[in-house]
Image (spheres, rainbow, N blue to C red):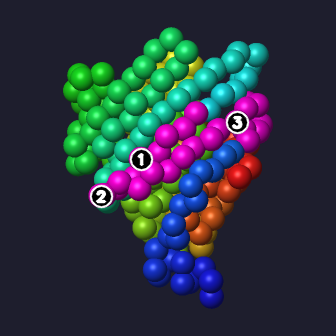
Amino acid sequence: MRFWKARRMGFSAFPATAAWRHQGLRDGFEVVHFHRLGDGWRFTGCTTAVEEGQTWIVGYTITVDAKWATRRAEVRGHSATRVLEADGAGRWTVDGAYVPELDGCLDVDLESSAVTNTLPVHRLALADGATAEAPAAYVRARDLGVTTLAQTYRADGLSYDYRAPAFDFECRLSYDESGLVLDYPGIAVRAA
C-alpha cells in the first residue's frame, strides 16, 4: 500500500544530502547535496575512488528542469573540466561546441556517480511493467570524455531493471521513496 501511494502521488521529497559507498569495480565514496530551484533541481556532489590501482576525483553540479531533463552539467576532474549544456529537447553542447552524437539524450550519466540514475527514473515516471529507452550523455570518470550511452529502464515497484548494452551490463536497481538509488549491484550502495 505504501508503494502504491508513493507511485500514484509521485516520489517523496529528497533529503538534504545523500551518500554512496562504491563497491565491486572500485573503492570510494560519493556525496551529493540537493537544492530545489524554482523550476527544477540542482545536484552538487563529489566522488572519489580507486579503480584498477588508479585514483580519481570527480566533482559535479547538475541542473535539471521541471520535466527532469538535464539542462546543464559542470563536471570537474583533477586536470580538466567539462561543461555540458542541453536545450531540454535532446540537443547538447560540450564546452560550447555542438555535439550531434548526443542528439536525443535528455539525461546526463556520470560514470563516477550513482545519483545520476535518479534522473531518468524521475523523468520517465514509468508505470509498473513499463520499459523505456533512456540514452544519456555519458561522462567517463578518468578523462571526462563524453559519449552517448544507450540505456533501458523497466519499472517494477521501487526497483528498475537496468540495461546498458555497451558494457554488456544488466542489473536490478533498488530505489527509495524519493527516487534515489539504494543499491546499484557491483557499483554502489547507499550509505546515508
Taking the view exactly as shown, the residue that stands out farthest to the bottom is 1
Which label is found at residue 29? Answer: 3
Tell me which corner region of the image, top left, top right, bottom left or bottom right, holds residue 167. top right
- Is 188 one of the magenta-colored residues? no
Q: Is residue 54 visible?
A: yes
Total numbered labels placed on residues in the image = 3
Q: Work out whether residue 125 or residue 192 is closer to the camera in this orientation and state it.
A: 192
Q: CA distance from mark 3 to mark 1?
A: 20 Å
The image shows residue 191 at horizontal and vertical percentages of: 74, 49
Q: CA distance from mark 1 to mark 2?
A: 10 Å
Of mark 3 and mark 1, the one earlier in the sequence is: 3
- The residue where tag 2 is placed is 39
67 relative to 169, above or below: below
The segment highlighted magenta reads 21-46
Q: Which of pointers 3 and 1 indicates the residue nearer the eye?
A: 1
The image shows residue 158 at horizontal and vertical percentages of: 61, 69
- The residue where tag 1 is placed is 42
